[in-house]
Amino acid sequence: MEFVGILWITNLSIILLCKSKGADFCATGEMQVSPASIIRLGSSINISCILKGSFYNECAAQQLYIIESNTRQLFTVQVSANAITAHIPKFETPKSSFACKLLCHTEYLICGIDIKAGNPPDQPRNLECIQKGRVGDVICTWDAGQATHIRTKTVLWFRNESHSFAASATTAERSTAKCTKPRKMPEHQRLGFACESGHSFDPFSTYSVWVTASNQLGYQSSAVMNFTLDEIVKPNAPTFSGIEFNGSTSFISTIYWKDGQNAELFEIWYQTTNSSKWEKFGSILHCFYMV
């Protein structure tokens, strides 16, 4: 959990609140949460506030109370002379703050704690990789599943015959489920994933790729995909040069385009001005491929 300092001044008294995992220890008391301060959405939790020291000896423990997000006072049970506890049977908020206060002639803030709830990562599925043109980036995408709401580390792993490398990101948001590995740029970062410096994909290698996702609630790994660059290359779109119609009929035309990537197959599609549907040309069209 991140460290947060809170300054509270009442009657010239200063109370510093310091954050720690599972329990917050403050100058005049502490708050504890069970089973943990990061839990699965929908779990039940117990929140306790424990008064310590002799500063408030003149106050009784029943004057302690716990407030959620500065708005809702929780029902509490006194468990000792200086401690209370509250039970939440179903915690369904991704993040909420709780404060323990003491009413003793005036109101004192004793301590505070943040509780986060989320989901373990789903197994990454439908992993696919493409290369954008013969000299373009290799881009891998996958289905990340439901949002986790908590910090989740996603790693895209690559391995070939000589070595392995990875691209990774850590975020509390839904995974972008996309990573780009550079072929030429020495340093590259896109969509929050830090990519390995200076790596170039070997066109003669077979690569294995898989995705792992992990957070404090779980770990998942995708199935492994194997590929060579020839198997995943996606040709760039040809450059359209023009179209010529036979002077005696509008049913015969010649289409010209340029392409420098040795594509094996071209399909010609057309759309009429009064239609939103695209159609593929039949065999009556005569087409010429221009380099």
Image: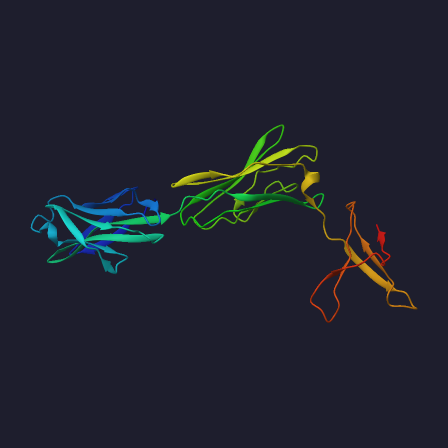
Q: Quadrant of residue 74?
A: bottom left
Q: Of 59 and 45, which appears nearest the observer?
A: 45
Expressed as whole percent of the image width and height from the top left, the position of residue 256 reads 83, 57
Residue that appears at 74% across and 65% down: 271
**Farthest right residue?**
248
Expressed as whole percent of the image width and height from the top left, the position of residue 110 reads 19, 50
Quarter of the figure with the N terminus: top left
Number of marks present in the image shown: 0
**Image check: 139 left or right of 285?**
left
**Farthest top residue?**
162
**Image check: 63 left or right of 141?**
left
**Farthest bottom residue?**
274
Q: Of 45 and 107, which appears nearest the observer?
A: 45
Expressed as whole percent of the image width and height from the top left, the position of residue 108 reads 17, 54
Expressed as whole percent of the image width and height from the top left, the position of residue 83 reads 15, 46
Residue 138 seen by the camera = no
Q: Of 267 and 171, which appears nearest the observer?
A: 267
Residue that appears at 33% across and 45% down: 39
- Image height check: is 225 above or below 173? above
Residue 145 seen by the camera = yes
**Image check: 23 left or right of 262?**
left
Q: Of 120 and 60, which appears nearest the observer?
A: 120
**Image check: 16 left or right of 191?**
left
Residue that appears at 60% across and 44% down: 128
Question: In this figure, which colouring scheme has been used for the structure?
Answer: rainbow
